[in-house]
């Protein structure tokens, strides 16, 4: 009886389905039936790799149709996204939610990796909001890098397509690799095998400076991300030969620069530092440090980094430290080396700064003002992203979150790369052209009229006044640097190139520093002094300067 009833039920259901498919609304019915069957199968998904293979089986007309359908589907998804979230239904497992990619943005094909890299380079100047989501091309590259093969594709593309003449090229390499997942040991080994670096390869790459520079930049970025055994393994004898050969006189200056930066970052691991130091690198750098005041701004960067490395990392027997021989008698105001992070490089004169880290580093002057009219100038050494201007005692800088000068209500900054004025983490365009190496940027602060004026080679912009709604005193000259950026400050110790027509004062005329306050010690000497400092048992555990006279309860600290 039960068997007979089951057979009758199945026959009736099949007949009903047949009649439904033969009806005038058959296409919709078939779609409904198919959806119901897929729903009964659970959360099925199609892998990206399988999807790519399937795409190759269709001709161009079929691909065009698929793209049109995808656009229609995505539009519907965008309209109903909020409702889907409210209903608690599971998200599409084929496209899990990712930071910055909306439902109207399908995954890019892996085959477009070169295009995605160039898209990111092209759009990076438009990222003008700290809360702005990353460009879709960058997010897609990060997705690709989640697998070893995808990560290797991204790295190879960065080496292959970033142009030599774009000032933001190396910064984009750092930005992309810094956000990608850490490579596995197998991925690093495969990369080493593919690059197969040696002194001979460096000589061959010298014929292609873009590839040569990009390879050294990638190595430097990986050295900064990795630590311990992974960094030691990446600095193989062949890699060391490649980087040292890249410092030869036959190399392009930008190749020399990024090879040196890579060696610096590898040397953050003590064993690597010993290996590099034993390679007689200090002899090569002793020649290159003479470029520190070169008229060619690219060679000037090489000289600056060579001098800094000789003072801080690769010490040379018999060489006098730069701070011991520089003449600071006429300098009364300089960059404050005591309240910056270890990632910012400041010259022994205290007037030139450079950032080679992946963070957004900031620095301010040693002198602040409360009234009057003040002016200083900056010479642009690199034409990438820097925010330079005025900050106050209340300004807060978060280097790893990308917040610098102009990113709070107590500071205002000029950005000549993206052609923006920054205040309170918001930007507005200005009319100056993009700055370039050697340009003079002027900064006038008029506390009587409560206004700031920015100049490019003597050409002024309209005054900025918004910062004075939050701050009226305690202003410092200050600047923030993206990766691989450098500039020189003039606080009045030498004549200005484009002084404004109004009457003004300079920091150097009114500030004063003790001789000991002017000394910017190399890191190893500063650490040695810190080790000599003794802290009494009964001193305050917060400031370590005076005796404790208060006890915190219930912890008992004092």
Image (spheres, rainbow, N blue to C red):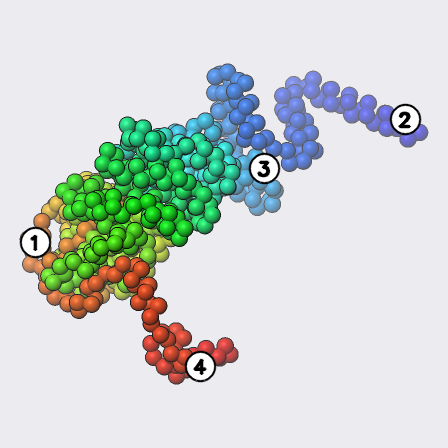
Q: Earlier in the sequence, mark 3 or mark 2?
A: 2
On the image, numbered disc 4 is attached to which residue? 551
Q: Earlier in the sequence, mark 2 or mark 4?
A: 2
Q: Residue at x 39, y 29 (%)?
A: 115
Measure the C-alpha gap from mark 4 to mark 1.
54 Å
Q: How many C-alpha atoms fall within 10 Å of the one at disc 4: few (<14), some, or many (≥20)?
A: few
Residue 4's tag is 2
Tell me the quarter of the image containing the N terminus.
Answer: top right
Marks 2 and 4: CB-CB under 8 Å? no
Marks 3 and 2: CB-CB under 8 Å? no
Residue 495's tag is 1
Q: Is residue 120 left or right of residue 16?
A: left
Measure the C-alpha gap from mark 3 to mark 2.
41 Å
Of residues 117 and 280, the one nearer the viewer is 280
Farthest residue in the bottom direction? 549
Q: Earlier in the sequence, mark 2 or mark 1?
A: 2
Residue 408, visible in the rendered structure: yes
Q: How many C-alpha atoms fall within 10 Å of the one at disc 1: few (<14), some, or many (≥20)?
A: few
Q: Earlier in the sequence, mark 4 or mark 3?
A: 3
Residue 416, visible in the rendered structure: no
Q: Residue at x 25, y 61 (%)?
A: 521
Measure the C-alpha gap from mark 4 to mark 3.
56 Å
């Amino acid at each position: 009886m039960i068997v007979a009833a089951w057979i009758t039920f199945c026959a009736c259901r099949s007949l009903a389905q047949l009649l439904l498919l033969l009806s005038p609304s058959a296409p919709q019915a078939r779609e409904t039936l198919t959806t119901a069957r897929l729903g009964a199968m659970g959360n099925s998904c199609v892998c990206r790799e399988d999807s790519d293979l399937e795409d190759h089986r269709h001709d161009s007309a079929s691909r065009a149709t698929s793209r049109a359908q995808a656009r229609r589907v995505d539009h519907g998804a965008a309209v109903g996204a909020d409702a889907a979230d409210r209903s608690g239904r599971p998200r599409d497992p084929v496209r899990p939610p990712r930071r910055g990619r909306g439902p109207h943005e399908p995954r890019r094909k892996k085959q477009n990796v070169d295009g995605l890299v160039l898209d990111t380079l092209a759009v990076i100047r438009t990222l003008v909001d700290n809360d702005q989501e990353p460009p879709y091309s960058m997010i897609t590259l990060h997705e690709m890098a989640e697998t070893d093969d995808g990560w290797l594709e991204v790295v190879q593309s960065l080496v292959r397509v970033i142009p030599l003449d774009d000032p933001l090229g190396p910064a984009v390499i750092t930005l992309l690799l810094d956000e990608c997942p850490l490579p596995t040991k197998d991925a690093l080994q495969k990369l080493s095998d593919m690059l197969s670096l040696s002194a001979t390869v460096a000589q061959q790459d010298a014929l292609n400076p873009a590839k040569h520079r990009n390879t050294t930049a990638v190595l430097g970025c990986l050295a900064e991300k990795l630590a311990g055994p992974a960094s030691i393994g990446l600095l193989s004898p062949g890699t060391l030969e490649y980087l040292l050969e890249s410092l030869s006189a036959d190399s392009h200056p930008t190749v020399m620069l990024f090879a040196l930066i890579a060696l610096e970052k590898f040397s953050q691991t003590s064993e690597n530092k010993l290996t590099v130091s034993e390679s007689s690198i200090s002899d090569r750098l002793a020649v290159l440090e003479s470029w520190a005041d070169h008229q060619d701004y690219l060679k000037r960067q090489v000289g600056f980094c060579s001098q800094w490395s000789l003072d801080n990392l690769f010490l040379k027997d018999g060489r006098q430290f730069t701070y011991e021989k520089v003449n600071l008698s006429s300098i009364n105001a300089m960059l404050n080396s005591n309240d910056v992070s270890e990632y910012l490089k400041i010259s022994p004169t205290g007037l030139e700064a450079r950032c080679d880290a992946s963070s957004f580093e900031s620095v301010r002057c040693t002198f602040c003002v409360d009234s009057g009219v003040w002016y200083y100038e900056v010479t642009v050494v690199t034409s990438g992203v820097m925010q330079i201007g005025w900050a106050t005692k209340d300004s807060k800088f978060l280097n790893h979150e990308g917040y610098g000068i102009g990113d709070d209500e107590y500071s205002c900054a000029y950005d000549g790369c993206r052609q923006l004025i920054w205040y309170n983490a918001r930007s507005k365009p200005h009319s100056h052209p993009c700055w370039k190496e050697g340009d003079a940027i002027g900064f006038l602060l008029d506390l009587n009229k409560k206004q700031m004026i920015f100049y490019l080679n003597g050409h002024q912009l309209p005054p900025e006044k918004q910062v004075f709604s939050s701050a009226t005193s305690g202003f410092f000259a200050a600047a923030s640097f993206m990766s691989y950026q450098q500039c020189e400050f003039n606080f009045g110790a030498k004549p200005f190139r484009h002084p404004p027509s109004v009457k003004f004062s300079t920091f150097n005329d009114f500030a004063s520093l003790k001789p000991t306050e002017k000394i910017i010690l190399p890191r190893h000497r500063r650490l040695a002094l810190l080790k000599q400092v003794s802290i009494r048992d009964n001193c305050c555990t917060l400031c370590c300067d005076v005796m404790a006279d208060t006890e915190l309860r219930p912890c008992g600290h004092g």
